[in-house]
Structure formats: C-alpha cells, structure tokens
C-alpha cells in the first residue's frame, strides 16, 4: 500500500474536505464523457445493425442456433472424390484417343459382302468356308472415331473392344451374312496424369493397366511438402473439379479413386485465417488449416473470453455468407452483394449451455471475424476505478500542501 493509500485509509481531518472536493472536480470532466475507450460496440448495437448496408446489401443478423448451424452445414457439404468422380476403368481395358486397333470381320458362307466364296476341296465340290476380312490397323483420331467399310464412322474412344465388336456386327446385319467381329488393341498411346502444387517433384506420370490411384500419383511425385493435415487435394477431370483434405483421403480408402488419363491432381497448402477482436484473450489474425476448424476451436485459439469484460450474450461472427446457407424465410428479405454474398452477423449466446454444442459443429471460413462485445458493467467498473484513482491523487495533493 502506498503512503497516500495508507493515509486515506486512516482518515483525514475535516479540512481535507477541500481535497475531496478537488478530487471530485478533477473527476467531473471524466464523468461527463459518454464512453470509455473500448474495442468495439456493445451487443445491443451489433444487433441493431440489422438492415445497415454493406456493399449495397443490408446486414442480416442471425441467431446461431442448432437449426441455423445445420442449414449452414448442409450448404457447405461438398461431394467426395468417390461421389464426384466415381470409378473408371484401368488404362488398356478401354480404347482411347491415339490407340491403334485391329478389326477382323468374319462372314458365314455364302459370303456376300467381304470377298469371294472360297470352296474347299475341288472346285466342283460345292463345299464353302466362311470368309474373313482383315481391315488395316487404324489409329483412333482426336474425335475418338474410326471408319469401318459398310459401317461408316463409329465412336470407339472410352469403350471396350467387346462393346465396339457388338456395334459393328449390329450395323452389318442385313448387309453381311451372319457377321462376326473381333476388335483388339495393338498399341496403346501413352496416357498421363499431371501432379502439381506442393509436391516434391511435380510433373506428368504414366498411368498403366495397373490402374494408378490418387495416392499412387502423389507417391510418384515424391509426396507432399506440407504436413498431411494441412494439405488439400484437388482433382480436375474435364469440367469436373473435386476437392478433399488429404488426410480424409488417407483415412477413407474409397476416396483413393482410380485416375483417368489427363487428370490433374493438385496438392494445395492453404493457411486460412480468422480475426479475433473485442473481449477475447488475444486480439489477432489467427491462421488455421483449410482442413477445417469449428467456432469452439477458434474461440479457444483466440484465448477464450475475457472474464473481466466479456459479455457472454454478445459473441458475434461476421461473414459474407453463401445465400444457400440461410433459411429461406431469412433469405426472402435479404439482398446480395455484387459478388453474390449476403452480409451476415451470427450471434451466439454462451449463457445457454446448448450454445457450446452449436459452436462445436459450426465450421469457420477463411476471413471470418469473431467479435466479443464488452459487458455493459465493464464501463461502469472502469469509471469507478478511474474516479477512485483521481480521488487518491487529489487527496494526496491536498495533504502534500498541508
């Protein structure tokens, strides 16, 4: 305890009333101030922000309940590799562009379409044999087609030899006598997949009849540079794009799908961030992995709520939200920003124990902002402490004069 505090606690003569008056006079300008310094608005001010414009769209305030959290979760669910890409046949089991194929057509006697009748034995024996016509080898063109006499152009790319045999035979019916067709691949063009991104050795790698899968391609590229839990995989197949965390692919063998020629596998390290402001233990921009984080984990990483000033009714998350994540009733009155998003403030009331379960399942997005407002009594506490400090100072000044 300081000398001033000891003297104040012991009591002063009546003449020190002048000192108390001086202290109160010093505190007067402070008492006249409407607000003390703080890091943001009260919870009531944030709630009243509903309707205020952001990028020409009004702010929507949503109570973060279990129903709202499930709506957001349903809108964020992405297709897995198995759902988006499915299984494909191994290279060599289907015909591809650039492959060379051989076609043989057999016709029962009397062969009317392909070649002349070949008698067996003497010319007068009248015994005839089936005739075959071996067509020149053909390379499948860039459109995936070949040409067959009396059949015309036929698409063969992406089909099995047995399937092509059946179509050629069907087209020849009525032209040839009981046609039989054999199709075989004589040469496979090289088929490649590309592996790029945060891998040790990016490049193009051959896929073979073995049927290489996603993890095989990563192994061929020397593995990923970043930790498995911080890496996201993206597979591009034509117009289809599917994304999954690498650790999810490793844990679920069904997602280690077989790759098709010309697939592009991209390994991405995406350190996302959220910003924590207000009455939290740590005000900062905090990184987290693109593999995911919940609101409960984010609050923990931000140091939790400040016991001295946080309003447990006033935990807010600011986000430019996908319209599909909002309840149709809420969306009916909402407008989107030029980029198609809705400015949303999610409000979480941590005085309700159920809110902790909601926070446990609510996923964070990149660039989310968490704000915890001050409790209304926090400013009163600041004011009281400030008045007391000025009173100590005033009394000390008076006693020094005495």
Image (spheres, rainbow, N blue to C red):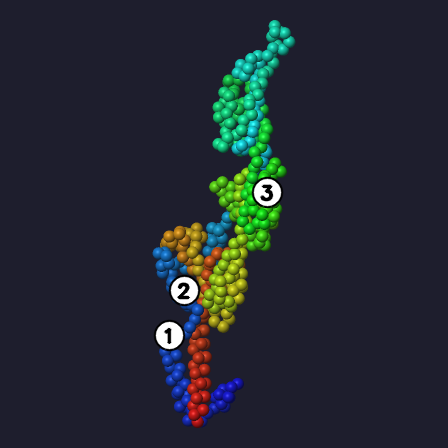
Give the distance between the C-alpha atoms of the residues marked 1 and 3, in whole angstroms: 66 Å
Mark 2 vs 1: CB contact within 8 A: no
Residue 273 visible in rendering: yes
Residue 378: which quarter of the image? bottom left
Q: Position of residue 376 (x, y in %)?
A: 43, 72
Q: Earlier in the sequence, mark 2 or mark 1?
A: 1
Local packing at callout 1 (Cα closer than 10 Å; few below 14, some 14-19, many 20+) is few
Q: Which residue is mark 3?
A: 213
Which dot marks residue 241? none
Give the distance between the C-alpha atoms of the residues marked 2 and 3, in whole angstroms: 50 Å
Label 2 residue SS: helix
Give the position of the C terminus as an image quadrant: bottom left
Residue 383: which quarter of the image? bottom left
Label 3 residue SS: loop
Residue 181: which quarter of the image? top right
In the drawing, does residue 242 fall left or right of residue 14? right
Give the distance between the C-alpha atoms of the residues marked 2 and 1, in whole angstroms: 18 Å
Residue found at x 48% / y 64%: 276
Most foreground residue, 346 or 133: 133
Residue found at x 61% / y 7%: 123
Q: Earlier in the sequence, mark 1 or mark 3?
A: 1
Q: Earlier in the sequence, mark 2 or mark 3?
A: 2
Residue found at x 57% / y 14%: 109
Q: Position of residue 377 (x, y in %)?
A: 44, 73
Local packing at callout 3 (Cα closer than 10 Å; few below 14, some 14-19, many 20+) is some
Q: Which residue is mark 2?
A: 46
In the drawing, does residue 75 fall left or right of residue 222? left
Q: Which residue is mark 1?
A: 34
Image: 145 above or below 191: above
**Residue closest to the far right:** 121
């Amino acid at each position: 305890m300081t000398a001033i505090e000891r003297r104040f606690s012991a009591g002063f003569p009546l003449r020190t009333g002048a000192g108390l008056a001086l202290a109160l006079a010093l505190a007067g300008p402070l008492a006249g101030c409407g607000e003390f310094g703080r890091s943001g608005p009260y919870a009531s001010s944030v709630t009243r922000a509903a309707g205020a414009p952001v990028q020409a769209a009004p702010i929507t305030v949503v109570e973060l309940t279990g129903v709202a959290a499930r709506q957001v979760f349903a809108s964020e669910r992405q297709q897995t590799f198995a759902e988006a890409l499915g299984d494909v046949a191994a290279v060599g089991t289907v015909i591809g562009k650039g492959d060379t194929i051989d076609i043989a057509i057999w016709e029962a006697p009397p062969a009317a379409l392909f070649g002349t009748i070949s008698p067996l034995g003497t010319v007068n024996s009248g015994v005839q044999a089936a005739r075959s016509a071996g067509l020149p080898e053909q390379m499948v063109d860039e459109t995936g087609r070949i040409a067959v006499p009396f059949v015309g152009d036929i698409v063969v790319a992406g089909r099995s030899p047995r399937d092509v045999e059946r179509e050629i035979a069907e087209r020849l019916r009525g032209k040839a006598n009981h046609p039989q067709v054999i199709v075989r691949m004589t040469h496979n063009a090289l088929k490649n997949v590309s592996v790029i991104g945060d891998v040790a050795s990016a490049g193009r790698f051959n896929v073979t009849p073995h049927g290489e899968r996603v993890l095989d391609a990563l192994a061929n590229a020397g593995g990923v540079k970043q930790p498995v839990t911080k890496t996201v995989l993206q597979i591009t197949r034509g117009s289809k794009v599917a994304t999954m965390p690498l650790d999810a692919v490793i844990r679920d063998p069904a997602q280690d799908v077989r790759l098709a020629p010309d697939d592009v596998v991209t390994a991405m390290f995406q350190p996302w961030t959220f910003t924590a402001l207000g009455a939290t233990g740590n005000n900062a921009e905090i990184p987290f992995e693109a593999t995911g984080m919940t609101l409960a984990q984010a609050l923990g990483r931000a140091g939790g709520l400040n016991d001295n000033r946080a309003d447990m009714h006033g935990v807010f998350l600011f986000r430019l939200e996908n319209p599909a994540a909002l309840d149709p009733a809420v969306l009916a009155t909402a407008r989107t920003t030029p980029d198609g998003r809705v400015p949303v403030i999610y409000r979480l009331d941590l005085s309700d124990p159920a809110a902790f379960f909601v926070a446990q399942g609510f996923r964070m997005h990149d660039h989310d902002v968490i704000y915890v407002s001050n409790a209304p009594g926090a400013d009163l506490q600041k004011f009281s402490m400030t008045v007391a400090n000025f009173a100590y100072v005033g009394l000390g000044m008076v006693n020094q004069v005495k």
